[in-house]
Image (tube, rainbow, N blue to C red):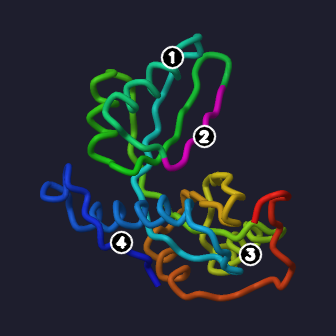
Amino acid sequence: MILLSKEQDVFSADRRKPQEQLAGRAIGHAARSAGRGGNRAMMEFSGTATQFSVFLVSKPGVLTQVCQALAKEKVNIIALTMMDSNEHGVLRLIAQDTDRARYALRRLNLPTAETDVVLAELPNRPGAMADLCSRLGADHITINYAYCTGNAMNGRSLAVLKVSDLKRAIKLLEVRKPRRKEPVIRPRGRR
C-alpha cells in the first residue's frame, strides 16, 4: 500500500514526471506523519524519493552554505546524512520539494548526483530495521546503503535505502507484513 497525500506541490507539480509527483506525495506523507501522534506497530512502505548526493570539500562552513541555500529557497529537509573522508564529504539528503532543492543546489555549483531511494516508516522498537533488511535480503535485494531519521516523538522513524533493484523492492514492500511482537519504545515524560 503506497501512502499518498491529497495535497499538491504547487511550486512544481505541472513540470514533474508522474514518478516525481508520486515521490513528492510520499515524502509529504512521511513529513506530515512525523508530526502526528499515535503509533503503528509495523513497517509501512512510504514510496520512493529522489536523494541528492552533494560532494563537499572538508572545510569549515561548506555544509553551512548548503543548508543556508536550501533554507533560502524554503526547502524542508526530510532526511540527511553526511559521510566524510580526509579530503571530501558526501552529503546525502531528501527534500520535501525536489525541484526547489535541485534549483538551490545547482546555484551552489557543487558536484551533485541524484538517486532514487526507497522510503519506509519504521516503528521505534528493537528489530524494526532488521525486519526491513531481512525482507529485502530474503528476496535477494542488496541494500547498498541506508540511514534513518530519528523521530521518537510519535514512535516512527523514516528509513532511507538505496537498493540494487528498486522495482522489486517496491513490489515487495507494498505488501504489509508484521514481524516482531516486541513492545514499542516510547520516550519518557511525553504521551
Quarter of image, res 124: bottom right
Residue 14 is situated, as x and y percent measured from the top left of the image, at: 13, 58
Judging by the rendered image, the residue that carries numbered circle 4 is 5
Q: Earlier in the sequence, mark 1 or mark 4?
A: 4
Q: Earlier in the sequence, mark 4 or mark 3?
A: 4
Q: Earlier in the sequence, mark 3 or mark 2?
A: 2
User: In percent of the image, x 59 and y 11: which residue is there?
Assistant: 60
Residue 58 is situated, as x and y percent measured from the top left of the image, at: 59, 16
Q: Which mark is residue 98?
A: none
Residue 184 is situated, as x and y percent measured from the top left of the image, at: 81, 73
Judging by the rendered image, the residue that carries numbered circle 3 is 131
**Closest to the observer: 89 or 154?**
154
Residue 71 vs 62, above or below: the answer is: below
Write the start and end of the magenta stretch as one range: 78-84
Judging by the rendered image, the residue that carries numbered circle 1 is 62
* Distance from the alpha carbon under mark 2 to that under mark 1: 15 Å
Give the residue type that dot 4 points to: Ser
